[in-house]
Image: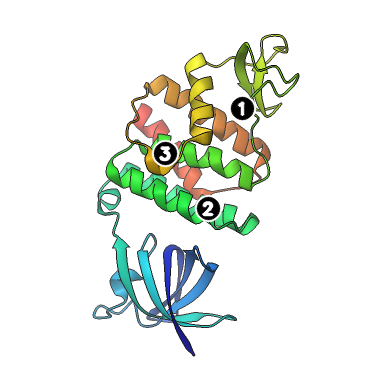
Amino acid sequence: MEIKKIEGIVISEVNYSESSKILNILTKELGIIGVMSRGCRKLKSPLRSVSSKMTYGNFHLYYKEEGLSNLIGVDIIDGFNNIKKDIDKISYASFLLELTEQVYKQNNDSSIFDLFINALKKIDEGFDPIVISNIIELKYLDYLGIGLQLNECCICGNKEDIVTVSSKHGGYVCKNCLSDIPLISSKAIKLMRMFYYVDISKISKLDLHYDTIKEINNFIDEYYDEYAGLYLKSKQFLKNLSKIVSK
């Protein structure tokens, strides 16, 4: 059996037998692979601390192309310790874990891995987890085949006088085509395009008003609900959490 070292991150885990786990690991090189972590649930197991969601590192495996590989050990690249100390951060990180797994199953593009890892790094650095999640959600739209048109009016092609973004029409709408389409603020219109195209790894500052964040987040939720066809338990948890916080 071949021994491989593969960079990856655990995106989900399932208990197996009395003491083991099956890990689903997103890798840039091989996509999502299944790995058996034998005995990792035992208190003294050296694999215990590295056999859980969001473990990011170089995984040493007895690798099998077919079936489950076996975990030997992990060299941690980033522990995301700040995320794990904060309920909001861990909640949004968990949402991105679940979303990324679903997106990758529909489009196994290796660039998804880099987007996801860079998002977790930014949340761990202290950037607003809602904003970082919204950026990733917008970027994932193309991988899902439901990308927005944010360069011109999606109805007539006009590049001037953009006044809103329409979930029904899938992008920018100019004032000439506006008809029974809800308006959003000019700030949200500009930021959505910036989020869509920004290199997330190069973000150094995000200072946004809460109302603008809420406006963008609500639009993205509506768009995903309408077109993505994904049901994510973690997203519902975030919605419930926001209701509790706003009370």
State the SS at label 1.
loop
Percent across and percent down for residue 117 are 41, 53
Query: In this picture, is 191 found above or below 124?
Result: above
- Give the alpha-carbon distance from disc 2 to disc 3, as whole Å: 15 Å
Give the residue type that dot 1 points to: Leu
Q: Which residue is mark 3?
A: 132
In-image side of 199 versus 145 (left or right): left
- Judge from the rendering whether residue 199 lies leftward or rightward of residue 42; answer left or right: right
Front residue of this view, candidates 75 and 199:
199
Question: Residue 150: which disc?
Answer: 1
Residue in view at x 54 percent, y 41 percent: 139
Q: Secondary structure at mark 2?
A: helix
Amino acid carrying label 2: it is Ile
> Mark 3 belongs to which amino acid?
Ile
Can residue 125 be seen from the camera position used here?
A: yes
x and y, in percent, of residue 165 in the image: 61, 22
